[in-house]
Image: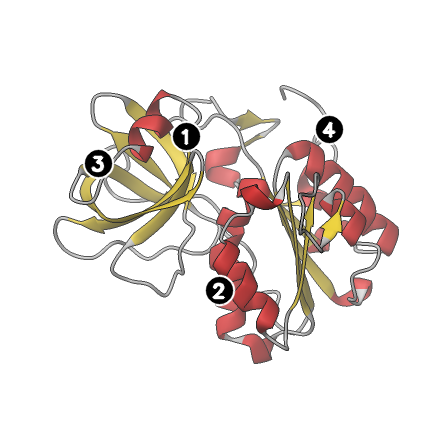
Amino acid sequence: MPANAFTPSVYRVARRRRELAGVVTLELAPLSGAPPAFAPGQFNMLYAFGVGEVAVSMSGAASDTDTFVHTVREVGAVSRALGQLRPGATLGVRGPFGTAWPVAAAAGTDVLIVAGGLGLAPLRPAIRAILAERARYGRVTILFGCRNPGEMLYRSELAQWRRRFDVDVEVTVDHAEPGWRGHVGVVPALIAQAEFDPRETTALVCGPEIMMRFVLSALRERGVADEHIYLSMERNMKCAIGLCGHCQFGPAFICKDGPVMRYDAIAGIFTVREV
């Protein structure tokens, strides 16, 4: 936990990139000093001055020490205000908070990464970290699903990953468009055909909860053990340090004990609503 957990630091928007309609990526630089280190999977609280604060996962590489990168979907008053910020504008940042993907612990295993929609953003730092030390891992597979080709996040980076000989990347869309030559259907359906050793696989999963439920079923059918499956959970986080209770999830708090949680630790309550 940062020493000044409730006090935001002031950052400026160094770069802004429109990813999709309603989705922007902001590169944030502190007004002084360097950002604190973070681990893939962690999040910051981003404060639009005069509007409010929301939790947003890091989407840039943890090795980038000059800035934080966040991909924001404009769905509410705060996220819309953040999405309208232009280079040079300032905002508040608290963090980093939360748990991380088991990037180091997964070394030596096959790694299966399953993302749905904007769920690719919190996984992107883990993917970059794994690819930066590719030799430490077995087979690496990235499965990504989105509604249609026009909603494909990080399109150019996905293309770069697909060109690598040492990574298997499969993309599927719910609804195809003219010219689309890839998979059509939901992302869990890709798991049955993916090549990995279920006994020696670490699965990293992020997306809508309904998608993650079907992904879990597909992984268990392939024989991946619950203790090797990691999910990034999402709830309405406010304080980010486990005090306010807004993100309570059974005996845990998503902000403090998550957002990355090992499935066997939450299997008993994962399908229970409002716990």
N-terminal label among 4 and 3: 3
Residue 271 is marked as 4
Residue 91 is marked as 3
Residue at x 15%, y 44% (from the top left corner): 88
Question: Residue farthest to the front?
Answer: 178
Residue at x 18%, y 49% (from the top left corner): 30
Instruction: Please state, as top left, top right, bottom left or bottom right, where the N terminus lies in the image.
Output: top left
For the residues labelled 4 and 2, the Cα–Cα distance comes to: 31 Å
For the residues labelled 1 and 4, the Cα–Cα distance comes to: 27 Å
Coordinates of residue 103 in the picture (x, y in percent): 55, 62
Who is closer to the viewer here, 83 or 215?
83
Instruction: Please state, as top left, top right, bottom left or bottom right, where the C terminus lies in the image.
Output: top right
> Is residue 22 toward the left or the right of residue 230 in the image?
left
Question: Residue farthest to the bottom?
Answer: 135
Q: Which amino acid type is marked by label 4?
A: Thr
N-terminal label among 4 and 2: 2
Q: Which amino acid type is marked by label 2?
A: Arg
Vertical order, 104 against 76 (above or below): below
Query: What residue sits right under mark 2 in the picture?
Result: 128
Query: What residue sits right under mark 1 in the picture?
Result: 74
